[in-house]
Image (cartoon, rainbow, N blue to C red):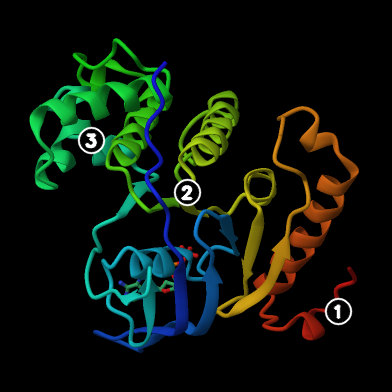
């Protein structure tokens, strides 16, 4: 299988990010003064209780939502709209793929928008399909594939785009457990091969620890970073060994306690009375 050339990666910095939804009714302060930095080539997971502002944060990172204040800096430039060099994979793969286009055409479409010449586009599509183990499926339509395969197509589309930053928002929430494990391993192996910066949002604590080099735990609303947890599980992870590792168990308990405390409104570790 030919390797996809390294896409390069970029540092992502969130500076004093706040987002309050205004509209009809009471304003909702979703995120307050959020600060963090993700280095180029890091794989960082973001967890937090439901309603903590994970989707709001991700939409801001993707340039789809304008912050109320603060800024997001990608590779040194403040973003003001969907930045080039950034690809997003969402939970709802069913809705993110065009049913009237084949799998290959779906992957190729953003490359056309990027004005990549046809011969290179075909190469990128073939490489991306191979990377997600879907070589030979390009002529099928998305609706002819299982949910897990459709999500692989969405990942292939993001990878073919050669992003510097890959944002994923609960991408595996709708697939069965076995497929989910396979897709998690796929994300780790693509991350290792491409060297891309990955931000992965999930409410699943085990998934966050299994995947991440760091796990940012969000507080309850208005959301701040509750704790930045470093995951020392090594580069080689395996669904069976890593998940039965004592360090995995320790991290899981710790992050679980944090998320529970966040659910009950704690916004600092001191407030939450959590041991390390
Ligand atoms: P999460 O993804 O962690 O579940 P969200 O980012 O979806 O959290 O939501 C954070 C908070 O912002 C919630 O209280 C939610 O009700 C509110 N919210 C999200 N979108 C809107 C919107 N368009 N208008 C008003 N409030 C919103």
Q: Helix or strand or loop: what does disc 3 sit on?
A: loop
- The disc, 2 or 3, on the residue closer to the chain's N-terminal end is 3
Left or right placement of residue 230 versus residue 216 in this view? right
Q: Dividing the image into four equal quarters, which quarter contains ligand 1?
A: bottom left
Q: Position of residue 167 (x, y in %)?
A: 41, 53
Placement of 68 over or under 215, stated as above or below: below
- The disc, 1 or 3, on the residue closer to the chain's N-terminal end is 3
Corner quadrant of residue 225:
bottom right
Q: Residues within 10 Å of mark 3 (few under 14, many from 20)?
A: many
Label disc, if present, on residue 273 of the rendered structure = 1
Mark 3 beta carbon near ligand 1 (under 8 Å): no
Q: Residues within 10 Å of mark 2 (few under 14, many from 20)?
A: many
Q: Residue tagged by mark 2?
A: 170
Query: Which image quadrant: the N terminus?
Result: top left
Residue drawn at 54 percent across, 63 percent down? 50
Q: Position of residue 118 (x, y in %)?
A: 9, 29
Mark 1 beta carbon near ligand 1 (under 8 Å): no
Residue drawn at 24 percent across, 21 percent down? 143
- Give how far apart the Cα atoms at labels 1 and 3 are: 45 Å
| Cβ atoms at labels 2 and 1 below 8 Å apart | no
Residue drawn at 71 percent across, 35 percent down? 237
- Give how far apart the Cα atoms at labels 2 and 1 are: 29 Å
Q: Position of residue 267 (x, y in %)?
A: 67, 83
Res 222 seen here: no
Q: Residue tagged by mark 3?
A: 97
Residue drawn at 28 percent across, 13 percent down? 137
């Amino acid at each position: 299988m030919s390797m996809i050339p390294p896409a390069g990666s970029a540092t992502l910095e969130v500076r004093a990010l706040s987002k309050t939804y205004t509209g009809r009714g009471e304003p909702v302060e979703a995120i307050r003064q959020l600060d963090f930095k993700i280095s180029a080539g890091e794989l960082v997971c973001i967890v937090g209780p439901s309603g903590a502002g994970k989707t709001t944060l991700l939409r801001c990172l993707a340039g789809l939502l304008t912050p109320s204040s603060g800024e997001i800096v990608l590779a040194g430039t403040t973003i003001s709209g969907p930045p080039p060099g950034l690809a997003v994979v969402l939970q709802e793969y069913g809705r993110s793929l065009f049913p009237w286009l084949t799998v290959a055409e779906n992957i190729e479409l953003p490359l056309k928008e990027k004005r990549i010449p046809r011969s290179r586009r075909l190469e990128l599509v073939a490489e991306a399909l191979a990377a997600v183990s879907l070589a030979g499926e390009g002529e099928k339509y998305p609706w002819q594939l299982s949910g897990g395969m459709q999500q692989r197509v969405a990942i292939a589309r993001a990878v073919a785009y050669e992003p510097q930053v890959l944002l994923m928002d609960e991408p595996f929430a709708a697939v069965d457990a076995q497929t989910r494990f396979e897709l998690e391993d796929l994300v780790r192996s693509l991350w290792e091969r491409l060297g891309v910066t990955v931000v992965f949002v999930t409410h699943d604590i085990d998934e966050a620890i299994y995947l991440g080099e760091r796990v940012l735990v969000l507080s309850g609303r208005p959301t701040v970073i509750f704790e930045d947890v470093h995951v020392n599980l090594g580069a080689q992870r395996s669904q069976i060994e890593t998940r039965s590792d004592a360090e995995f168990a320790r991290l899981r308990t710790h992050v679980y306690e944090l998320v529970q405390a966040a659910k009950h409104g704690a916004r600092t570790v001191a407030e939450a009375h959590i041991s390390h």
